[in-house]
Amino acid sequence: MADAPRTVLISGCSSGIGLELAVQLAHDHRHRYQVVATMRDLGKKGTLEAAAGEALGQTLTVAQLDVCSDESVAQCLSSIQGGEVDVLVNNAGVGLVGPLEGLSLAAMQNVFDTNFFGAVRLVRAVLPGMKRRRKGHIVVVSSVMGLQGVVFNEAYAASKFALEGFFESLAVQLLQFNIFITLVEPGPVVTNFEGKLLEQVSTAEFPDTDPDTLHYFRDFYLPASRELFHSVGQSPQDVAQVIVKVISSTRPPLRQQTNARYTPLIVLKTVDPSGSLYVRITHCLLFRWTRLLNLGLRCLACGCLRFRIWPR
Ligand code: NAD
């Protein structure tokens, strides 16, 4: 007899990776999943419902959930049939880019409230049930910025580092309960997330920021960031596919990167534990060897550099 479908609750499904993941799981040809696709604002459910097609009301339901609100989380969980979540995907997230002096503390706290405490709030809500049933899988959409800091993304990277430390620590205890944790670490993904953010910051004023820093941000960081997304950016569909594979695995890994083209960019961090190599080379590539950086990114995009380093 086939196993009963697993209930998968996903946060942040009105767009991007969350939307794609909800749709792919709901269309699983073996009908292994019952998807609760949640979003903060149900007024934005149209795109998801259209993409879900026949799965809507069958293997996919849409529910309201604001990861920053205890009441919203409690209400959402109480609306789930049987109240049981087998797989939780913490996907909701916000970004923040810009010179530190020009960003408010409130904006940085919002990043932590959503990206870090939002995930913690959901995990605390589903964990007692998972522990009672002695099974479960918690997937956290982290980022390569949870592994290495990226200039002008300090608060965002810090929120993802916080997730990495929190969930790596929790993973040890949870194995006793047969509950797995997976930190999914995408590189650049071409969604609203970065597109909107880069558009906003290119026209933002950033008061209290000195002219040199603004010049480095606008004339070095922003063009390099656009080139990075253009050259090695992944589609949300590709990232969702990786997450589907992780969810269907019987022994899911603790960490899962999604973009092989980005791997060479984190090698500097892994080969030198002191961190100096990463900081110095990234500094030179961004501010001094801009042409080399662009050439390198184009090589990564065509795959030649990666296959020279790691031949197939
Ligand atoms: P996206 O903006 O399309 O999706 C983020 C979703 O989170 C949106 O639907 C948004 O409404 C939702 N959200 C924000 N605050 C919320 C709240 N309080 N409650 C509920 N939902 C809320 O962007 P995306 O790229 O699909 O991002 C999904 C995840 O992937 C995020 O955690 C992001 O940090 C991570 N990520 C994105 C990239 C990238 O380059 N786009 C790279 C690495 C990791």
Image: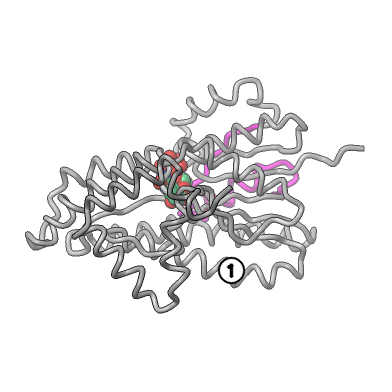
The residue at 66%/49% (across/down) is 246
Tag 1: residue type? Glu
Q: Which residue is mark 1?
A: 168
Name the residue nearer the viewer: 161 or 122.
Answer: 161
Q: Is residue 52 above or below residue 199?
A: above
**What's drawn in magenta, residue-wise?**
60-85
The image shows residue 225 at horizontal and vertical percentages of 29, 48
The residue at 24%/40% (across/down) is 199
How many marks overall? 1
Q: Residue furthest right?
A: 1
The residue at 42%/39% (across/down) is 302
Magenta stretch: residue 14 in it?
no
* Disc 1 secondary structure class: helix
Where the N terminus falls, by quadrant? top right
The residue at 68%/47% (across/down) is 247
Q: How is the image coloured?
A: one colour
